[in-house]
Image (tube, rainbow, N blue to C red):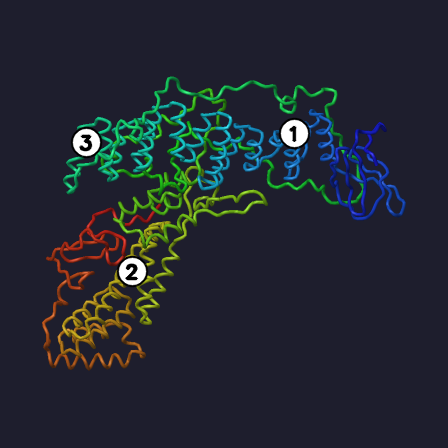
Amino acid sequence: AWDVSPSGGTSSKLFVYTTLHHVKYCLSTGDTGTIRTLDNPIYATRVVKDQLFCLDREARSRVISIDTTEARFKLALANKKYGQVMHMVKHSRLCGRAIVAYLQSKGFPEVALHFVRDPQTRFRLALACGNIEAAMESAFSLEQQQGMDGKARDVWGELGSEALRQGNHQVVEMSYQRKKDFDRLSFLYMLTGDSEKLRKMLKISNMRNDIMGRYHNALLLGDAAERVAVLEASGNLPLAYISAKLHGLEDVAERIKVAIETQEGSVEGLMEKVAVGTKKGGRLLQPPTPIIRGGNWPTLEIKKTTLEDLSAADAGEEYEEEAAAPVSTDTGGAAAWDDDFGMGDADGGAGAAADDGFDMVDDDDMGWGDDLDDLGDEFGDDDAAKAAPVDEMAGLNEISDDAGFQMPPAGRPPAACWAANSSHAAVHMAAGGASSAMQLLHRQIAASDFTNLKGPMLGCYLGSTVSLPGIPGSGSIVVPLMRNDSSGHPGNDSLPRTTANMRTLVAGVRQGYRFFQTGKFNEAKNAFSEVLSQIPLTIAENTSEANEMKEMLEICREYITAIRIKGAMAEAGSDPVRSTELAALFTHCNLQPAHLLLALRSAMGTSFKHKNFIVAASFARRLLELPDMKSERNADLRMKATKVLQKSEQMARNEHTLNYNENAAFTIDCKDFVPIYSSDESVKCSYSGSTYKGSEMKGNIDLTDGFCTVGVETIGLVTGK
């Protein structure tokens, strides 16, 4: 049936027909499509707007509602009725990948930009039609969603390539800055004659310790002195000497000569290897001095397309939608084009983040903290901390007013707020600032070797966000997990969730207890060491949890020390003096009563075996004073301890002279396992509390936790937010 108007006239070239299960349409351009599905076969007789008049198999007349928006849209586009096209775009539910692909295939990607809201799709469409402004808005939206990871950097790279093709140097500069593509940025400044910013790039390369970057920038600037300095800093002294001599830097050449001779080298014959004044000889590498600074390429104004200029559409062809007539109780399937894939009510990038002046040094690390911390986002030394913060990219991020666009104000991603709201290392690691997190741990607990902390730190970073897969063809959505959003979004005061908590620590300590009870000392040591590595990256919710965390720290230290002493006892089994001393020190570790009972029983047996009856009697008394000794299960042990005490009191002598005085207060040296009395010099680990006799261990890694430096006085463990 041909589509007809209510007055009876035939509309232009829209043919509606039915199959066994579908209502379909066909256009004179060859385009076809499905309007809706059918529950029962029907026979079409007439189509008026969105009403299909038909007969069913019982020959009863029926009216079925159909949606011909898609067909009318294609027909209007084919007939170049652009007023109707733009009216449908603004007021109809036209969406889906198929319609976007159709518009692109017909050469109208700018039409799809009017209703597509997905940033990734908008970005591709904007590049297809050369709309740099729309592409930039989508790029900022993608950056907000994904962070500055590999995908976001690829987006900025594609935008920079398209802007470079159009000669828009300002956008190219901003894209390279966002992508952190320093080499291309330097080359762009060289091509545009911006020597001032090129010198700033040289300064940035110097701060990043990028030897090749420094040398390339020095070449582009024609700075011979800087090239000589780079060669000298990289250890290429002969090349540095030759370069200094060729460029007439005699003072520098003389200093390099002294350095070469100090290293038992010689400069004789070096200059003979350079053929100066011949065709094969060297040439001065000096770039031409820029006369004027290049700007954007000049563009030729062209008339807007009819779709862009709505005023050019015929007023008489204005499309007016009419309400659908009442329909029967038939409920067919939705139109095949109505496959909304998540491009709904989003703002299309209007709320996308932007940078104030496209500054490359953001507060938000987003994963760049461990690679680009030397751009000024790190804790400096004490002298640098007193100085005002310096933006190394200052002067490179200004875009002149002739760029032709103004971006909306930037919002702050959650990760940027996290690092600003807390001084806890776990929060900085969750925000992606590995460098600042390591610096905090170094300042707070003197952490130096981060091998044991790698797992917990990665857990903090990976556990602070979740990735939700989107619909087919769209990227995943990264959702930050916040621990203070129970009463609503906290805004700029947000803080992340972390993987480690008190339940995790308690479970680790209990597992260590079980291994220790059953004599699996290696497994017990691993369990307590893991808890020690998790504590610095665990955030206490209140004061009670903070105190419990510090108690767990002491428990882990005592048990790791006890296990190490137990291993030393096995090695010193043939030495009666040393084995008795170690057994005695083993009983002075702060263990659980059940575990202390085992330690005292072992020490009592060892001392009695080697005829050191004084200390054997002491261990027997301490053993009998334990509450657990009163139970029936320890009746045999109680009888043995009583006999040992009686025998030791009769003998009342030690066979050997021991370095052990139970009546004096002392701590245990965690390296040599000897008593440290109050009058002895000692150094201590500010995190685990392990003590070492003398100053030999000062500046070395703690043997208990394995990652902190001994003898450094710090603020200690930071437990709260």
Please rate how many residues cluster around mark 1, counting C-alpha atoms within 10 Å: few if below 14, some from 14 to 19, many from 20: few
Can you tell which of label 2 and label 1 is closer to the viewer? 1
Residue 470 x/y as whole percent: 56, 45
Q: Quadrant of the N terminus?
A: top right
The answer, for residue 391, to whether it is visible in the render is no
Q: Which residue is mark 1?
A: 90
Question: Which structural element holds mark 1?
Answer: helix
Q: Which residue is mark 3?
A: 253
Q: Nearer the viewer, residue 151 or 119?
A: 151
Callout 1, which amino acid?
Lys
Taking the image as shown, residue 96 lies to the left or right of residue 166, namely: right
Image point (18%, 70%), residue name: 584
Image point (35%, 43%), residue name: 370
Callout 2, which amino acid?
Cys
- Spot the residue most to the right: 59
Residue 606's label in the rendered image is none
Residue 491 x/y as whole percent: 45, 38
**Mark 2 and mark 1: Cα distance apart in space:** 66 Å
Q: Is residue 270 above or below residue 79?
A: below
In the picture, residue 555 is in which quadrant? bottom left
**Mark 2 and mark 3: Cα distance apart in space:** 59 Å
Nearer-N-terminus badge (1/3):
1
Question: Which structural element holds mark 2?
Answer: helix
Taking the image as shown, residue 263 lies to the left or right of residue 204, namely: left
The answer, for residue 110, to whether it is visible in the render is yes
Image point (36%, 59%), residue name: 506
State yes or no: discs 2 and 1 in contact (Cβ < 8 Å): no
Taking the image as shown, residue 174 lies to the left or right of residue 337, namely: left
